Image (spheres, grey):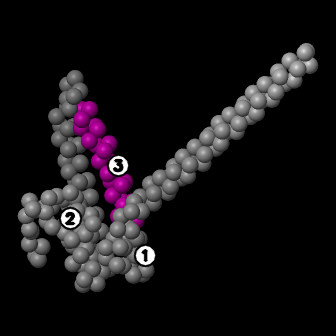
Amino acid sequence: MNNKKIMKNLKLINYLLLLSLLLNVTIIGTFAYNYFTLNNREIRRNTIRNNNQPMGMMRFFNEELNLSPEQQDEIGEIRFSYMENARKLQDSMIVLRSEIFNETFAEKPNQKFIIDKSNELGKMHAKLKIYSSNYMREMYENCDKTQQGKLKEMFLSMQNTEIEVNCRMNRGNNSNNRKHINTNR
């Protein structure tokens, strides 16, 4: 009888060990999966951030404009340069806005400081608009006539103007409520 009890206990211990082993393998597998999956996502995010270029937007331009490989390379370089310069300027603008905000709610706000920083922010904003205008013009010049018309419509759509643009990037405007803008200037 004692032998049967020992054998029964050994079976139970073996089942518990097997269950424990499966649980440990599952836990380690979950950790490994999350580590590699999250790590790969973070690497992709950092790659996009380091390039300062959302991958989807270039693909969108390529598909909508039917760009040649040479145009894709040239416009990719133009876009990369623009995004790099714009990002640096936008980062500086964020700092200025924060300084203005903090001074506005200081115990005794310095109005001259606020005015000076606001003027500096305005100059940076104007510089950003110049970057944007040059970027759009350089892209435009790298397109043929058909692509130029389509690119102009795409940029108008991105500016959230109320214009009907025949591309996949419409910003949710109801086409019945859109005003048609004359773009032939």
Quadrant where the C terminus sits is: bottom left
- Residue displayed at 33% across by 58% down: 86
Circle nearer the N terminus (2, 3)? 3
- Residue displayed at 8% across by 59% down: 177
Residue 128 coordinates in the image, percent (x, y): 26, 58
Q: Which residue is mark 1?
A: 73
Are there few (<14), some (14-19), or many (20+) residues within 10 Å of tag 2?
some
Q: Residue furthest bottom?
A: 145
Residue mark closest to the camera, 2 vs 1 = 2
Tell me which corner region of the image, top left, top right, bottom left or bottom right, holds residue 69. Answer: bottom left
Q: Secondary structure at mark 1?
A: helix
Q: Secondary structure at mark 3?
A: helix
Q: Amino acid at mark 1?
A: Asp
Q: Amino acid at mark 2?
A: Ser
Task: Give the CA separation, mark 2 to mark 1.
Answer: 24 Å
In depth, the one of 27 and 154 nearer the eye is 27
Seen in the image, is 6 located left or right of residue 142? Answer: right
Are there few (<14), some (14-19), or many (20+) residues within 10 Å of tag 1?
few
Are there few (<14), some (14-19), or many (20+) residues within 10 Å of tag 3?
few
Circle nearer the N terminus (3, 1)? 1
**Does residue 170 belong to the magenta stretch?**
no
**Does residue 81 belong to the magenta stretch?**
yes
Q: Which mark is residue 157?
A: 2
| Residue 37 appearing in the image | yes
Quadrant where the N terminus sits is: top right
Residue bounds of the magenta highlight: 80-103
